[in-house]
């Protein structure tokens, strides 16, 4: 089976990951947060629309803080995945083997 990954697919995947994590942190159903991503404007920045009525007990500032925190974490994941998109499968396997042999922090 062959999977074709491109940058747009990776962006959508990470934005969806962020949306689901936001739902989990805010303890709301997945229908309470909608994600939009415009890939045609040059600068790619997702928009998350939250149904604040379903976020009982959370202030708008609290919702904003969750969105920013979760997206910042997912943005790191995005950078790693985008880096992987440009590599060949063999390069990725070699890198993974090196990482296993030399874990971070090892002397």
Image (cartoon, rainbow, N blue to C red):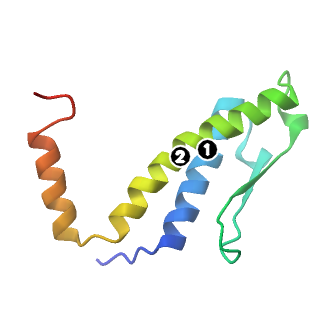
Q: CA distance from mark 2 to mark 1?
A: 5 Å
Please name the residue that numbered disc 2 is placed on: 74
Q: Quadrant of residue 72?
A: top right
Q: Quadrant of the N terminus?
A: bottom left
Please name the residue that numbered disc 1 is placed on: 71
Residue at point 86% right, 31% down? Answer: 60
Q: Quadrant of residue 5?
A: bottom left
Residue at point 18% right, 66% down? Answer: 91
Picture layout, residue 44 above or below residue 22:
below
Residue nearer the viewer, 94 or 31: 94
Q: Quadrant of the C terminus?
A: top left
Residue 71 seen in the figure: yes
Q: In the rendered structure, are the residues bearing label 2 and label 1 in contact, judged by CB atoms less than 8 Å apart?
A: yes
Position of residue 81 measured from the top left corner of the image (x, y, whole percent): 40, 58
Residue at point 48% right, 71% down? Answer: 7
Q: Residues within 10 Å of mark 2 (few under 14, many from 20)?
A: some
Residue nearer the viewer, 52 or 97: 97
Position of residue 85 measured from the top left corner of the image (x, y, whole percent): 36, 69
Q: Disc 1 on helix, strand or loop?
A: helix
């Amino acid at each position: 089976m062959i999977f074709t990954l491109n940058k747009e697919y990776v962006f959508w995947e990470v934005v969806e990951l962020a949306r689901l994590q936001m739902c989990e942190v805010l303890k709301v159903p997945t229908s309470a947060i909608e994600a939009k991503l415009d890939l045609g404007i040059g600068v790619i920045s997702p928009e998350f629309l939250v149904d604040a009525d379903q976020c009982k007990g959370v202030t708008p500032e609290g919702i904003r803080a969750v969105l920013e925190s979760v997206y910042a974490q997912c943005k790191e994941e995005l950078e790693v995945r985008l880096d992987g998109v440009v590599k060949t499968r063999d390069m990725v396997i070699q890198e993974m083997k090196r990482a296993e042999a030399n874990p971070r922090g090892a002397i």
